[in-house]
Image (cartoon, rainbow, N blue to C red):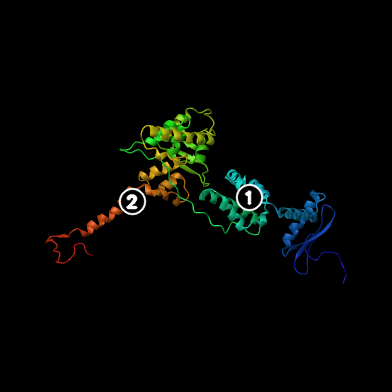
Amino acid sequence: MTWTTRKKDAAPRGVRRHESGVWGIRYTCGAGHLHKEKIGPIKGDAIRTYHDRRARAQDEPGWCPAVERGHARAEASKAKARSTFREYAEDYLKWAEPRKRSWKKDRARLSRPLEVLGDRKLDELTTADIERFLNSLSVSGATTNRHRDLLSAMFKRALRLGLVAKNPVTGIPKTREAGGRITYLPPTSPGRPAVEEDALRDALPADVRPLFAVSVHTGLRWSEQYALEWRDIDMLAGSIGVGRSKNGYSRRVPMNSTVRRVLVDVGAQRGRPNDPTERVFTVAYRTAARTFARSVARAQAALQDAGKDASRLDGYTWHGNRHTFASRLVMAGVDLLTVKELGGWRTFAMVQRYAHLAPAHLASAVERLVAREARELAPVSTNAGPVEVPAGTVSGQF
């Protein structure tokens, strides 16, 4: 038998099939080193990988896969190095900034856990440590739950990155949140004028009154209202476009005549009428919040001086305008499903807290039982006259 160096398979030079059936490649890297790699049972994969390695060796002088793997292992080892909670919190905020709309709130909220847990090793924190921290917060149940949710999200990412073995927040239940009193401005009725709304409107500065009117008549969240641009306003269709609401979905909010009138007046004072990206309202949130709080106090003082009840304005904030919008719709007989769509709530449970504001509808519902009973107990008339009820029989018994 004559020995030859000719390959016995139809494959490029550098691609060979082992006796086990596994295909492998052999090539020289950009640094001049000879490398061998096992690819797998598919010949095409081996050929494709071989050409990729050859092309990279030619395009990148000095490239060596062994050196590259060493750098990758070093980076992985560095990433898995035991870091403190403070170091990981900084990395988490950099990661969250382009991905979470609430990253600014997360940064502010992290100030509390950093004071207590900042210097602890991330992988040493236990469920007991997190629970003790949450119990030490002298805040409401809702605020405690927001801290818990943030810590849970941070440890979920750390678990995904291999920085911790488990999420220590998983076993901690959420704190029960109190429903609280729904503060709203009652609507105008024949026997009761809207004295609270009038007093509050009179106490507001002139530049905040348009925001207040639109808020009460649309139920927009402050973030949605502040982000409105003139291209979002469709006067012909009579609707306002909300590009991205709190829950991440867009929607359109219909305008009533009051909102139309306010927007026409605001539009007449535009600084750049040809710029569709111009903001509809330019008052900053902090300015509006401070101004609104002082205006509520002045409105209460005015009502008390006039000998009227000012308790409706106790604890009333800008978000109360959204409660006013929903409450007035319910009291006007609008069904809760429609209220949910108009207000942009994701779940039906969020609007059920307004159901008690429609007692007339509940009363009319149970009154139907009386009407049904009256029909069932009514005497049956025939041509022969009324039916005679035997003695000893209770009328209406069934």
Provide the secondary structure element on which disc 2 rests. helix
Circles 1 and 2, Cβ within 8 Å, touching? The answer is no
Q: Quadrant of the N terminus?
A: bottom right
| 1 or 2: tag closer to the N-terminus | 1
The picture places residue 52, in percent across and down from the top left corner, at 75, 54
Residue of label 1: 116
> Relative to 237, is 40 above or below?
below
Q: Disc 1 and disc 2: Cα gap in Å?
A: 51 Å
The foreground one among 67 and 27 is 67
Relative to 38, residue 310 above or below: above
Mark 1 burial class by Cα count in 10 Å: few <14, some 14-19, many 20+: few
Residue 168, position as x, y percentages in the image: 61, 57
Kind of residue sitting beneath label 1:
Val
* Rendered residue at 42%/33% (across/down): 301
Q: Foreground residue, 302 or 12?
A: 302
Q: Tell me the quarter of the picture where residue 12 sits.
A: bottom right
Q: Please tell me whether residue 266 is drawn above or below residue 239 in the rendered image.
A: above
Q: Return the mark for residue 103.
A: none
Q: Quadrant of residue 34?
A: bottom right
Q: Is residue 191 left or right of residue 168?
A: left
Q: Nearer the viewer, residue 25 or 377?
A: 377
| Direction bottom: furthest residue | 1
Q: Which mark is residue 362?
A: 2
Residue found at the very far right of the displayed protein: 2
Q: Residue at x 49, y 54 (%)?
A: 176
**Image coordinates for residue 251, horizontal then vertical, percent:** 48, 44
- Asked which secondary structure carries label 1, the reply is helix
For the C terminus, the quadrant is bottom left
**In the displayed structure image, the side of residue 321 where residue 102 appears, left or right:** right
